[in-house]
Image (cartoon, rainbow, N blue to C red):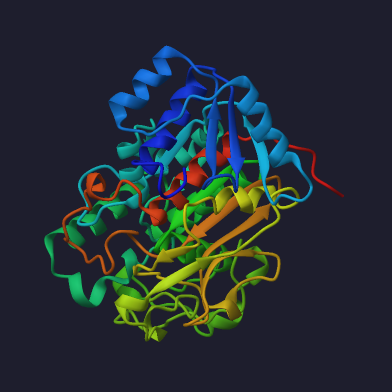
Amino acid sequence: MDEDSQKNHLKAYGITYFALEEELEVRWLLNYRGGSFLISDTEELRKECQIRGVSFEVISDEKTQSILEEISSPSQNKESVELEKAPKIAVYSPQGNKPWDDAVTMALTYAEIPYETIYDEAVLNDALVLYDWLHLHHEDFTGQYGKFYRTFRATPWYIQEKEESEALAKKLGYDKVSEEKLAVALKIRDYVVGGGFMFAMCSATDSFDIALAAEGVDIAETMFDGDPSEPGYQSKIDFNKTFAFTDFTLERSPMVYEFSSIDMTAKRSIPKETDYFTLMDFSAKWDVVPTMLIQNHTRLVKGFMGQTTAYNPDNIKANVLVMGESKLNNEARYIHGIKGKGFFTFYGGHDPEDYQHRVGDPKTELELHPTSPGYRLILNNVLFPAAKKKPRKT
């Protein structure tokens, strides 16, 4: 999985998933040649690699043992992690074509990793227990329809989305979309606390935490839920309920395309040509989880924007790990944390290969970006639940 030897890093994750489905022996060699995968050899696997255009090497048992001995040496910042099973994947996403795409869905499809799509009704009916990994599609859990009001309130897709959301909330027994979305967010919270893994990008990250923090508080204005927000709602926000963020200030105006002070989009002054973020360096033997999540063939990843592009370090909780950051703009791009028995990862930005993706833009064709470092971070998260869990050090 290093830069020079692999022609299609993204499809290599699909090959690894395929190997897990076939119950082959799979090891993830952290920090070894870009986070390579060591898989027991079969003729079927070789053919599958050739069909999908994935580069591979066949090595002897002697060479395998030599590599594993090198990795196990205390002097090497490397680790070998056994992958046990192909995780069952759910993507939380509404039905129908929205005027934006989703990087995770595209990555899964391109890598040929199977997933199932679920939405509010299934979540509220406890369907999440069937899955090992959950991705939150571009979503607004606050019931403010993505804060798209100023620019898109007269467009057919916005009007339709609002009508469909209101009808679904009513069907599920809620008076307001914000109340129904909060109920969904609480179910997702319980899924993670119970041991699930949640991955979210763009506005699904901060809007999720804001919804949890505003439980029982009306922060939506009349055009969103039919009545004004309650007076002094900022002082009623409970930061103890969030996953990742704290001490943030909500954006009160419905005319501003922003949720809160968490996001750094409006504060950015980085030219596109120099917009990169750096992946942090962790101890592979002691910090196995973050090391898995940052495996890549480069530590420098191209930046990309979204409704929520990056996170203000002042609003990140002390127990949340920053795995990717831009020192140039003092912002966190890629963060990870533990909640109860489960894990969550938040990734800022909308599409790693579309710098300033706008509503209605054509989707990215990953055939043109088969070695994308930004997309690799997504697929690291997909495979993470497959890793054999070691007892936590206490």
Q: Position of residue 247 (x, y in %)?
A: 61, 79
**347 shown above or below 13:** below
Of 384 and 181, nearer the camera is 384
Of 235 and 368, nearer the camera is 368
Q: Position of residue 253 (x, y in %)?
A: 36, 83
**35 shown above or below 224:** above
The picture quadrant where one finds residue 106 is top left
Residue at 25% in and 65% down = 357
Of 172 and 212, nearer the camera is 212
Q: Position of residue 128 (x, y in %)?
A: 52, 37
Residue 388 visible in the current orientation: no
Residue at 63% in and 61% down = 281
Residue at 39% in and 61% down = 140
Residue 197 visible in the current orientation: yes
Q: Position of residue 187 (x, y in %)?
A: 55, 46
Q: Residue furthest top?
A: 43
Task: From the viewer's perspective, tell me whether residue 195 is left or right of residue 188.
Answer: right
**162 shown above or below 261:** above
Count of labels in the image = 0
